[in-house]
Image (cartoon, coloured by chain):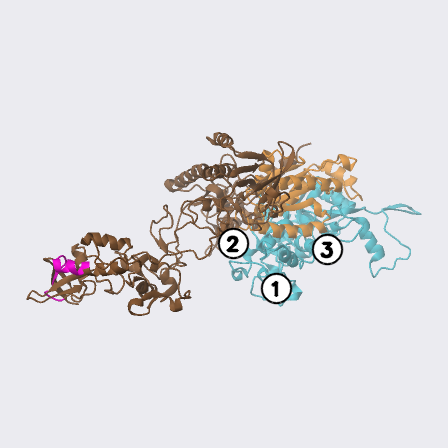
Amino acid sequence: MAMIKITIDGHPIEVEEGSYVLDAAKKLGIEIPTLCHYPHMVPYAACRICSVEARDGKGWTKIVTSCNYPAWDGLEISTDTPRVLNARRMNLEMLLSRCAPIPVLQKLARQLGIEKPRWGLGEDTCILCGMCVRVCDEVVGAHALEFSERGIFRKVATPFEEESGDCILCGACAKVCPTGHIVMEDIEQREIIHDEITLGPNAAISIPTRQAVPNVPVINTEYCIHFNTGGCKVCSMVCPKDCINYEDTEQYEDIKVGTIILATGFNAFDPSPLKQYGYGRYSNIITAEEFEMMNNASGPTGGKILLANNKEPHAVGIIHCVGSRDTNAHPYCSRVCCMYSLKLAHLIKERTEAEVYNFYIDMRTPGKGYEEFYERLSNEKVHFVRGRVAEVTDWAMTPEEEDRLVIRVEDTLIGMVRRIPVDMVVLSIGLEPHKDAEEVRRLFNISCSSDGWFLERHPKLGPVSTFTDGIFIAGACQGPKDIPDTVAQAGAAAAEAMVLVDKGVVELEPNTAYLTEEFCSGCKTCIPLCPFSALSFNVEKKISAINEALCKGCGTCVAACPSGALQQNLFDDEQIYEEIKGVLNYV
Amino acid sequence: MSDSSMTNNSFEPRIVAFFCNWCTYTAADLAGTSRMTYAPNARVVRLMCSGRLDPQFVLAALREGADGVLIGGCHPGDCHYQEGNYKALRRYKLLKMLLRKMGIDDKRVRLEWISASEGDRVQAVMNEIVEDIRKLGPLHLESWKYQGNLAAAQELSDAIKGVAYV
Amino acid sequence: MSKPKVGIYWCASCGGCEEAIVDLNEDILRVVGAVDIVFWPVALDFKKEDVEHMQDRELAVGFVNGAIRTSEQAEMARLMRRKSAVLIAFGSCSHMGGIPGLANLNDAKTIFDRVYHQAPSVVNTEGVVPQAQTKVPEGDLTLPSFWDTVKTLDQIVDVDYYLPGCPPPVKLITEALGAILEGKLPAKGAVLAPDISLCNECPRKDSKPDEFSIKEFKRPHEIDIDPQKCLLDQGLLCMGPSTRSGCGAACVSGNMPCTGCIGPTSRVRDFGAKALSAIASSLDYRDEKDILSHIEKIVDPVGSFYRYSLPWSMLHRRASDFDKKGALK
């Protein structure tokens, strides 16, 4: 397209022939008010607020709408002549005569100096700008809204004014509507489904977390309009560096490294198999993880602690050791649950008027300030019941238990079985090895301990290294632990890995196998036995050869060699025979 | 020589245990640090891998006076050196076939897969094998220790005329 | 100057070692030109008294073949030792026990039972069995006692050198004789055969793949044995990798697997255990059931792995855990 020269308010500017005056004015920084304009849609020119005066320099002049007036060479535009302002006022007064209560119109009215509209004040809120219709048509591509009726009965509606099956609930119409006439609303009483809570907002494109690396947005294909309808693509239109690629997919990369730190984390225990707690059977029995989601200020409840029916609980029971210290689940203590259960108790006390009961076996609160925190909670009148909860049920035996959950527990400090009615039960679930821990550890050839956590080299002196040189472990994958311990361990693992990287050389084990060449007949028994390919056939000498750098020192080839030509440093046949004699030579 | 007492009840079996360094030896370590008590009859010879186990070692142990041999390695698939334990398994199976023909009871030579965290297995297996061998009694292997002494050889050879064992 | 004296005696043997000496063919003339054979029951007419009347160490070299399993054989072995300056164990039987050594899977009573009562071709209605002592009108007759256990020569007397093989290959005998005559014998106790296994001189060595493994065991009669390919690679139990060389791979060249008669190299203490270690390691299976189903194809493990070396092995003979009256389990 050819480039032409136009003038706006005396300022010259070069633009493409046929481009719109409104865009040119924006480039010059000249403000022209609009109501029905949206940068990524075809201009509709319905509201007429963007009117300007066009001149040709030879005496021809006309009022035009800048949003859709195409520029031609020599065009002169004025945006603030009295004629222009008059035109805008007239249009606005007419709009106000139908739709007075809209804040955006009132603001515009004040800007244009309208004190009293001449034709009265209407009560409508839809200014028929068509933004919703156009966005649904052009950008979203769902075509769920349209203008219907004619003349003074014209309005925006869905086909036959029924719930539209085409609407994809994207909310674009509500977003572009300048007046707030269209809103997104729940059509049913909202129920809190505790195990489906996610932290929002669920923007279709957003940076996943504050600490994401790299710190760039990613498209959530489930919510993205483009991936649902093929339309939109507004994000790629606004991106100044053209970074959006809708065809991008997952790719596998091969990276060569010398050391590896495994920090694959843990899995939260699923309490469903423990039927006595009623998880999944009754509502309002939730895990601590679900509680935290609900408690988060950016969640759907705004951080309020609510039951499924949207009401606040009057009493909450927190059950410790769910899935831990349990021969039917995991025998070990998950280390972090007592502290987080106390934290939850504190939060409930802070945000609601509910009574809080903590059912524990032992209070495990080591660590700086942890015991003091426990004390504080006692002072906050949290009820501590020492006993393992036998059952959570909804069978009421007294009127005050009706419609509530009842916790049956033996209070071992008073030696009595109690029934405690509550509205919500929070299960303090334990930690268990990640679902793919077995797969991961075989991939890296490390061992695991009896409960499935990755095995450290030594329980006291080697907490971050493994029996496989160069592979380190950190965090909950090695065993349940809280954040301070994880951070410490991670630092240690990084330091140990850096030692290897800095040194630049690797120390080999001395117990490698060696071959006495004059004894080797070239029988090839040993060669296929080595998983590290340390043995090969020397074609000239017609005997085996060992690559000492590859040999890991297992001795398998030594035991297999039928003529004893292979021996192992530190574990020679003769040395072992002497050992055998030695260990048996006692009375 | 085995300690051959009159009654089986007071017979203390002598057992040599060949443990692989990474799994079974570590498990035995763990049993120790966890203060698990078990029968003290076995003496451990450490090998880097159960794949180092030469069947000659088993026979040498029996020849030197052991009443039983225990072999410990990593579970199949978990070998620190990938596959050593599979080779050990193959040799062990063939060796057992041979030992049966050579009149040595199945319970005397035993292979167990014990991983690094299974200290309790070490305890259990040790106790089991000691009891099994105590019931079997001492292993009488035909002994022949000729040290180059002609007179002694003569004496001994006369003594064993027509007699199966010394 | 009189020629050095040489004595040759046989114990529990088949006579094959004597044959091996005869197999020297013309070379035997060189031998008798260099030495005086003064005792050789199979070929010459000298008697035991002749040896007894010699001075101690009068024989320059004594060759004893055959294993020791009767009191007479032990007595003769001791006699030969006294009268020989250098005593050489000739052949597999005296070296490691040989084929007679397989009798160590049984004991004297079981053997007598079988031979004199139960063998299918025996008719012994009166139950006659040889006795160590019998009264006859003229006095008491004695027979040498029959031992339960077969022994190697060095389990009875001190042996200076071993000439292995069943029988020792002519080449090895010639080399040994040459060394003796030139006074160039190695250190005492040596086995007079190369200390490297058979694969070194096997004509089929090049056909063995680098990534060699055994998929299935076969017995020689079960397959058409390929005369060019490595026998182990065809699934046959060839003891070549575990056995010393020196025989020129005679059996392999005859399209049969090596059975290990020359014995192991000096680094091995038990032939059968080491051979089975190598063969089991090469078996290509990881699953216990697979392993068992394949090794069960080895129908006679003792005969396969300890064919010549049972008395020499670490176990020496069958142990007592199973009822020794019973047949092999």
| Residue C188 visible to an observer of this rendering | no
Q: Residue A305: give x, y in percent of width and height.
A: 47, 44
Q: CA distance from mark 2 to mark 1?
A: 25 Å
Instruction: Please tell me the colour of chain B.
Output: orange
Q: Is residue B126 left or right of residue A497?
A: right
Mark 1 belongs to which subunit?
A: C
Please provide the residue range marked out in magenta: A72-89
Mark 2 belongs to which subunit?
A: A
Q: Let me know if residue A143 is in the magenta part.
A: no
Tell us which disc is closer to us: 2 or 1: 2
Instruction: Please tell me the colour of chain A.
Output: brown
Instruction: Please tell me the colour of chain C.
Output: cyan
Mark 1 residue crowding within 10 angstroms, few (<14) / some (14–19) / many (20+):
some
Q: Residue A292: give x, y in percent of width and height.
A: 46, 44
Q: Which residue is mark 1?
A: C255
Q: Is residue C44 left or right of residue A365?
A: right
Give the structural element (helix, strand or loop) at label 1: loop
| Type of amino acid at the residue the image marks with label 1 | Asn
Q: Residue A475: give x, y in percent of width and height.
A: 46, 41
Residue in the image at 43% along x and 56% along y: A186
Q: CA distance from mark 2 to mark 3?
A: 40 Å
Q: Which residue is mark 3?
A: C14
- State which quadrant residue C118 falls in: bottom right
The furthest residue to the right: C137
State the mark number for residue C265.
none
State the mark number for residue A527.
2
* Residue A51 drawn above or below residue A289: below
